[in-house]
Amino acid sequence: MRENLEGVSSQSMAFTDCMKPTDLAAEGIKRKNWRNRIRCLLKRNSSLSILHLTENRSYRPTADDVNQWAQSLDTLLSHKYGKAAFCIYLKSEFCEENIEFWTACEDFRTNTSHKELVSKANSIYEQFIKNEAPKEINLDFYTKNAIAQSLHEPTATSFLAAQKKVYSLMQNNSYPRFINSDLYKELCEAARGQGKHIKS
């Protein structure tokens, strides 16, 4: 399947799950933006971190780390810098709401207090699920309706079906494009020490 993906431009594939036709004008700008963000991610001895993940630790992903990200989406998301790089990539494709929703669901499932569950469930619904939500994700009516009905008595699994759909969307569309992207190739080169800087 990966061979087939190489023949299809990332722009045309992006229409299916991320981009709108009006976003194509920003193509040149987004490439520069992800390069700037990756430069920050790869900087050694920097107290500023991408997505506030480093918390004043200087660390650079190793070549092994970056190579492992190509094994599976699970491996990528389990590595905080892999996840940060994927977030940057999704932002460049105008579909960062997918990873943000997936992450919110992961956090939601760790809540033990009923009060917290209700509060966070409503917050996730307002932000990602309801029609015209600020970061509305692409879900069918049935899934949205099931979530809306569960808001009165939410459980740790209230968003599980939606989370699986979004994960599948990322795994089948965004993730293969990320692994075949210039961004990932430049990360591999930088991690191997072959590229001193991400190209401007």
Image (tube, rainbow, N blue to C red):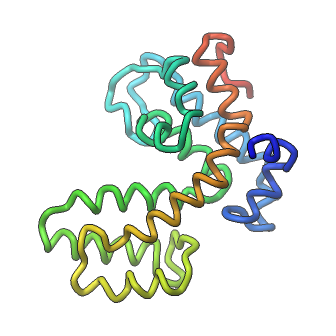
Q: Quadrant of the C terminus?
A: top right
Task: Give percent across and percent down for residue 171.
Answer: 58, 52
**For the image shown, how many numbered marks are present on the structure?**
0
- Please give the name of the residue rendered at 19% of the width and 61% of the height, measured from the top-left corner: 111
Task: Give percent across and percent down for residue 98.
Answer: 53, 60
Task: Give percent across and percent down for residue 151.
Answer: 29, 83
- Please give the name of the residue rendered at 37% of the width and 71% of the height, measured from the top-left corner: 159
- Please give the name of the residue rendered at 80% of the width and 54% of the height, measured from the top-left corner: 11
Residue reaching furthest to the front:
1
- Please give the name of the residue rendered at 43% of the width and 72% of the height, measured from the top-left corner: 127
Q: Is residue 128 left or right of residue 113?
A: right
Dividing the picture into quarters, in which one does residue 55 lie?
A: top left
Q: Is residue 80 left or right of residue 30?
A: left
Task: Give percent across and percent down for residue 90.
Answer: 60, 51
- Asked if residue 23 is positioned above or below residue 39 in the image, the reply reads below
Residue reaching furthest to the right:
7
Relative depth, front residue between 158 and 185: 158
Dividing the picture into quarters, in which one does residue 47 lie?
A: top left
- Asked if residue 124 is positioned above or below residue 11 in the image, the reply reads below
- Asked if residue 89 is positioned above or below residue 46 in the image, the reply reads below
Residue reaching furthest to the top:
193
